[in-house]
Image: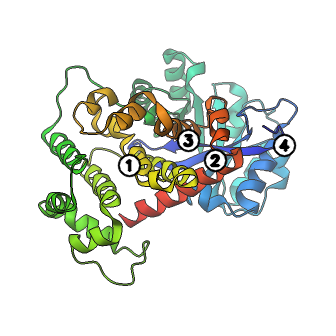
Amino acid sequence: MSANTTLLARQPICDVNKEIVAYELLYRFEDGTINSSIDGNTATSQVLINTFSLGECENITGGLPAFVNFTDKLLDFLPPIAPELLNIEILEDIEVTPELVAKVQEIKDRGYKIALDDFIWDDKYKPLLELTDIVKLEVPAMTRTQLREAISKLAKYEVVLLAEKIETLDEYQFCKDLGCSLFQGYFLYKPNIVQGATLSSNKATVLKLIAELNQQDADVDSIKTIITQDSELSFKLLSLINSAELRRSVEVTSIATAVALLGITRLKSWATMLAMTKLEDKPKSLLAISLQRAYFCEHVASIFNEKLAEKFYMIGMLSCLDLFFDISIHDLMKKLPLDEESKEALTEYRGLLGLILKTATLYEKFKLLDVPWAQLRELGLTQNDVNTIFIDSHVKANAMIDSL
């Protein structure tokens, strides 16, 4: 891989309901590393050029605000970007001087939100805290006692608390209980498994529906029957097909017509997706992740074998079921009538299906060093191909979510 190719790392920021409300944008080389020879000015410049100057903001953040690190020097050269699209992150190692405070005041007066990054309490930050909108607490760098003390000291300031580097649901709940209202980290991708717990009646019903939709021997008539017997599912499916986003020239008014338009495999995939929306205790962001993986896997499959695209789409869609049901993916496979190839892909990332699904999950967390690049190259996929497909799948997932 070329050391000169640069990419954007995009980390989701969630609210208390685990809905994605913003992204932090970071600069990486294509191997996932940060080169120490690249200073903060260059890094931020690359982020701003690649995201805003090239018109990629909508694709990368879906129109949500972007948090971007700014050095002292770059605060003097703020680009012409709408305040609602850009939050200014001030790094923890910046020297707090009267000149810096004056710069921040000017930026705030222009309507931008100010965030203090990797915050650990230090009296030197007091002048900045008066101007700060969001404090990003570096949770792993503090004990729980230190975290409580820092939050207590911040209580006098009108700031929103963002807990960053949150990796577990326990950390998320602890910080939420302390008053944090924004969260950054990969806890969102982990199921809340409680040993010995049973499925609620609603979840059991939805899981049964998904199992029925994915029977290997299901034919067109049986799928139509399953869907038409569920009035809510039928309504949602027809509404989706007729949505402005999908731009059908003729209104689809029956499930039979939907089957003819979509084909049985895509119909099963969409019906499975809509069944997941019945789980109202789960954030829409989980569905967005499922859809992004589905579109990613489908697009990759279509490059080397178009016949596999629909199956790959379904595997991507099913890959978040453990997050929806809070059951291990291994236990879920015992309840779903999938073929062994699909089960092994979902549980162990085995086979071609597993390879592409693993790539999707690693890429969404920007763990580029762990991506199986050698195997992907054997399939004719370059780093740029994967990057383009990932952004495209994100755009398609957002469009689908907007249509629901």
Label 4, label 3: how far apart the Cα atoms are: 25 Å
Query: Which residue is more in the foreground, 359 or 158?
Result: 359
- Tell me the kind of residue under disc 4: Asn
- Tell me the kind of residue under disc 1: Met
Q: Secondary structure at mark 2?
A: helix
* Residue shown at 28% from the left, 78% from the top: 252
Q: Earlier in the sequence, mark 1 or mark 2?
A: 1
* Residue shown at 67% from the left, 63% from the top: 82
Q: Earlier in the sequence, mark 3 or mark 1?
A: 1
Q: Position of residue 307 (x, y in %)?
A: 45, 55
Q: Quadrant of the N terminus?
A: top right
Mark 1 vs 4: CB contact within 8 A? no
Q: Earlier in the sequence, mark 4 or mark 2?
A: 4
Q: Secondary structure at mark 3?
A: helix
- Tell me the kind of residue under disc 2: Val
Label 1, label 4: how far apart the Cα atoms are: 43 Å
Q: Earlier in the sequence, mark 4 or mark 3?
A: 4
Q: Disc 3 designates what residue?
A: 364
Q: Earlier in the sequence, mark 1 or mark 4?
A: 4
Q: Disc 4 designates what residue?
A: 41
Residue 371 placement, left or right of 338: right
For residue 374, say whether it is visible.
yes
Q: Disc 2 designates what residue?
A: 386
Local crowd size for mark 4, using a 10 Å CA cut-off: few (<14), some (14–19), many (≥20): some
Mark 1 vs 2: CB contact within 8 A? no
Q: Disc 1 designates what residue?
A: 314
- Tell me the kind of residue under disc 3: Glu
